[in-house]
Amino acid sequence: MRAITYTETGGPDVLQLTDRPTPEPGPGEVRVRLALSGVNPTDWKSRSTADPGDGGKTPNQDGAGTVDAVGEGVDPGRVGERVWVWEAAWQRPTGTAAEHTVVRAEQAVPLGEHPFELGAALGIPFMTAHRCLTVAEHLPRHLAPGSLDGVPVLVQGGAGAVGNAAIQLARWAGATVITTVSSPEKAELARAAGAHHVVDYRREDVAARVREIAPDGVQAVVEVNIRANAEVDTKLVAQHASLAIYADDGGPEFSAPTRAFMALNTRFQFVLVYTAPAEAKTQAVADISTALAAGAIRVGEDAGLPLHRYPLAETAAAHQAVQDAVVGKVLVDVTA
């Protein structure tokens, strides 16, 4: 099969189009014939820093395709099932930038008749957003219509992939969704995703504007850049609010006004979906599937998430686009 592999860490140029044996599923596993692979920031970061192992590695965690073989203990009726895939490359060599991947059966989730573009965009962004919206004591353990009714939620950076996912999931669950962006163009994307209120942080006073919308403060912040936003977050969070920090945009370290957050009993929660509790991942997959079935999750320009497609041989360019923070979702067409 055709597969993108790398045998050493480095820039996108370490990714090579190779011919690899088609993997066989083991007990409890399924093999997926991939249509699309989704690219996330952790994919290029892993390629840059994590040892691919002696036999090399195929990158990318997310994807969508069709089950074409099952291992022992898996229902043979799953063959032919359209699925979305998550964490394919986590602690495994067989990521989704290939014609086939092998994952545990529960990591290939029924997609139904939804388009593969949507399936390949789910995985890491939506599971990360789900964790951010359910991680604190005062938040629901799972998301469903009404589970966040009236809860003011702030999504910092609503035009990004996780920001888009957080807006869509929070809106579906009934939250009052506020988001920040850096331009009028990104504001239009955030509105398309479903945000009730959009604040341009380069043109407006974020804390003052958020307090106009939520006088008592927001109860949950989905935070992409705590280094830049820690100070302003103290001015807009409610007492007992949670700050879910899922990225290190702005740098690897930050400082925060300790006394201000202490007085509010603010909860800081760092989120990395790969090492999140297994039960949290299981709940995320279940809730995302429910939202998907309800038509509450979309992709594309009219959903605030423009799609950028690359053929398999240009996976390096796809990684570079994500590394350059292109606005939207980058997909690799495995069939092209």
Image (tube, helix red, strand yellow):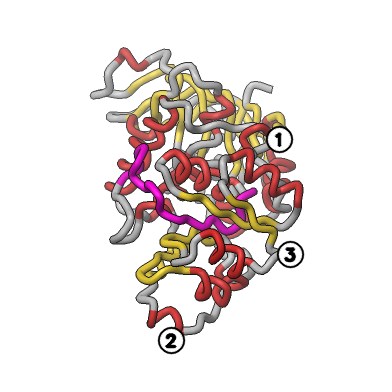
- Crowding at label 2, few (<14), some or many (≥20) Cα neighbours within 10 Å? few
Image vertical order of residue 155 relative to residue 248, above or below: above
User: Would you name the residue on which mark 2 appears?
Assistant: 259
Residue 33 vs 169, above or below: the answer is above
Q: Amino acid at mark 1?
A: His
Along the polypeptide, which appears first: circle 3 or circle 1?
A: 3
Q: Tell me the element at label 1.
A: strand
* Residue position for label 3: 202
* Identity, as a three-letter code, of the amino acid under mark 2: Arg
- Most extreme residue toward the bottom is 259
In the rendered image, residue 145 lying in the magenta stretch gets the answer yes
State which quarter of the image contains the C terminus. Answer: top right
Question: Where residue 323 sits in the image (x, y, percent)?
Answer: 69, 52
Q: Is residue 7 visible?
A: no
Q: Secondary structure at mark 2?
A: helix
Residue 19 visible here: yes
Q: Which comes before the other along the chain, label 2 or label 1?
A: 2
The relative height of residue 288 versus residue 293 in the rendered view (above or below) is: below
The residue under the point 68% across, 34% down is: 301
Give neighbour class at mark 1: few <14, some 14-19, many 20+ (Cα, 10 Å). Answer: some
Q: Specify start and end residues of the magenta stretch as a single range.
A: 142-159
Q: Is residue 206 or residue 81 the one in the foreground? A: 206
* Residue 312 position within the rendered picture, expressed as x and y whole percent measured from the top left: 67, 31
Residue position marked by numbered label 1 in the rendering:
308
Q: Are marks 3 and 1 in contact (CB under 8 Å)?
A: no
